[in-house]
Amino acid sequence: MPAFFFNVQGDHAPGEAVELPSIAEAKATAIRYAARLLSDSATTFWDSGQLSISVTDQSGLILFTIEVLGNEAPAIRAELPQAH
């Protein structure tokens, strides 16, 4: 069974090997992993506004990448009038 490595941008250590039967299963696992990371960082995600996970094979070849980017609209930065 092939091994896949899930590497989060900014992490300096390589991801742990996960044995999965196919790239399709690796893609599904990556989506679940991204969802868990986003859920776990719900209060801090907006500090950087991005999450990137690259999945590689045993030789280090990048097979695919998931990128999540959050953009705040200018309206959110405007101060709303204070209620008196």
Image (cartoon, rainbow, N blue to C red):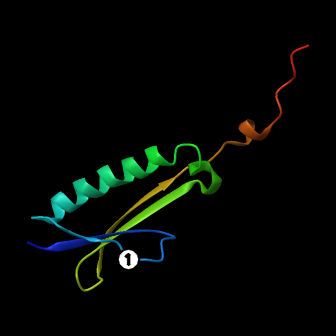
In the rendered image, which residue does mark 1 sit on?
14
Q: How far across and down, in percent of the image, does residue 9 sit?
A: 48, 69
Q: Residue at x 86, y 23 (%)?
A: 81
Viewport quadrant of the N terminus: bottom left
Viewport quadrant of the C terminus: top right
Q: How far across and down, in percent of the image, does residue 61 sit?
A: 29, 82
Query: In the image, is residue 4 above or below residue 34?
Result: below
Q: Amino acid type of disc 1?
A: Pro
Left or right, 29 with reference to 65: left
Q: How far across and down, in percent of the image, does residue 16 sit?
A: 30, 71
Residue at far top of view: 84
Task: Work out whether residue 17 or residue 74 is closer to the camera in this orientation and state it.
Answer: 17
Q: Residues within 10 Å of mark 1 (few under 14, many from 20)?
A: few
Q: Secondary structure at mark 1?
A: loop
Q: Residue at x 18, y 73 (%)?
A: 3
Residue at far right of view: 84
